[in-house]
Image (tube, rainbow, N blue to C red):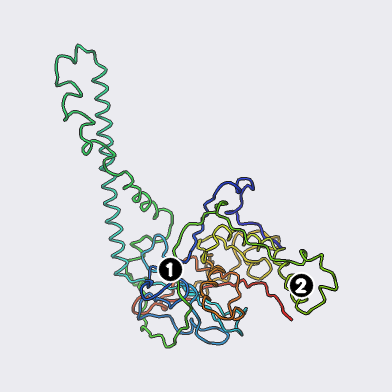
Amino acid sequence: MSLSNDPDYASNDEESDFEETDSSTFLGFVDVAISEEEQPDLDDTFIGGQPIWLNPDSPPPSELLMCKNCSSPMHLLLQCSANLENTFYDRVIYLFGCNKPGCRRKDGSVRAIRALCKDPALMKEREDQLKDYLKKQEEKKKKIEEKQKQNAKLTQDLFTVAAKPTSETSGSASTNPFGSASSNPFGSESSSNPFAANPFDSKPQKEEDAKPTKTTKPTYADIAKPTDSQTPKKAASRKLDIKLPAYPGYIVYIDQEVLDPKKQQLPPLPTTTATNADTSPEQSSSSKKSSNESKENDELAKMLDDSTFQHFTDIISYNTGQVLRYELNGNPLLYSSKDKISSLFYDSNGKLRPEPLLPTPGFNPGVQRRFELQLMPKAIIDLEANLENIMDGMEWGTVIVATDSDDIMPDHKFDENFVGYVEEWCGVQWEEEVKRT
């Protein structure tokens, strides 16, 4: 089964050769290594290193950080700052993985956690700050509109006077529109020029003002107001009683995806059995090594026959340094069409499903999960920079995370610091397994 290309990337072949295209996806690239001098904070997105909890006294329950196969503490793969529009609370997505050889390719060896902090006082403070900002933007907008009206009126008066006969205007200097600075509409830029104040100052107001109208969900005030039904039940805070292993850490910067043919770096095609067709039977069977290589080439050829994998590598070739893809409510960039993960997003005919067949959240069974982000294979290179034996490394092609579409956190999950954690769905597409003999 081959999958239809994501409509975001589908384009005319001729145009794609010459024109760059912006997508709705945001990409993460390694910026700087985490060190004593370069430390991430809660607003940062980073791979590896040690996690930063929403409150230092409110780590998640230890069981969420353990591999479901060997029960060992897992490494942090990703911490993504993922605050949502039209909300005032803090939100983070954590991704953990087990590196034990016996746990590879097993369910539960990679786990995703969504964390929220809904501190009513902090949310109210942010709400007030936004209201104050919008009020100031509205005042600026009104001043600009008033100046524009004044300028239009002065300009109209100017041409009305200029259009009168000379005999009516030549006898009095006071009627000369250019006779005094006080009547010259162009004489004082600060008082009459509508562009003296930056007109772009009003743009944020329009964007922010429009946001609340896009949804029928509760308003900012409704979310932030600490009513009895919305105030989380206070559970006791906890201390983390396990020590997490850590990969080298890297702070990630985020940028919008741009598909620019001029910057595309197509990977070299690996040697396949087809390219070795001229090899004589005697030569191909002369050693066990060549036999093993032939089997590996067969496996690689199968991967290359998968149009989904080809599309995956093609999209990556525009931005080879990407370690993260983020597109809330979007579609994942699938690594393969041959596993159970792909069937959740595409039907047997290779068509994108209107709704992915993702398991509903047990804590909120009435809603669907939505795609949010995926970790990309370049992250493996960075995380395993100090790995001596590559055979001991991670073997996934991509890790996909989908989250509750309502972003619900059950009340009993919040502690006394207003921090709560729930496990979300994560699907791993593993590399094509090359069997060696």
Dot 1 amino acid type: Val
- Quarter of the picture containing the C terminus is bottom right
Secondary structure, mark 1, is strand
Q: For this view, does 163 lie left or right of residue 58?
A: left
Distance (Cα) linking label 2 and label 1: 40 Å
Residue drawn at x 43%, y 71% is: 33
Q: Looking at the picture, which amino acid does disc 2 mark?
A: Ser
Q: Is mark 2 on a helix, strand or loop?
A: helix
Residue at 55% from the left image edge and 68% from the top image edge: 378
Classify mark 2: residues with Cα within 10 Å, few (<14), some (14-19) or many (20+).
some
Q: How crowded is mark 1: few (under 14 residues within 10 Å), some or many (20 or more)?
A: some
Dot 2 corresponds to which residue? 294
The picture places residue 21, in percent across and down from the top left corner, at: 54, 50
Which of the two discs, 2 and 1, labels the residue nearer the N terminus? 1
Observer-nearest of 247 and 375: 247
Image position, residue 65 (x, y; %): 48, 82
Classify the position of the N terminus by image quarter: bottom right
Query: Please, is residue 426 above or below residue 345 in the view?
Result: below
Relative depth, front residue between 48 and 425: 48
Where residue 181 sits, quadrant-wise, is top left
Residue 32's label in the rendered image is 1
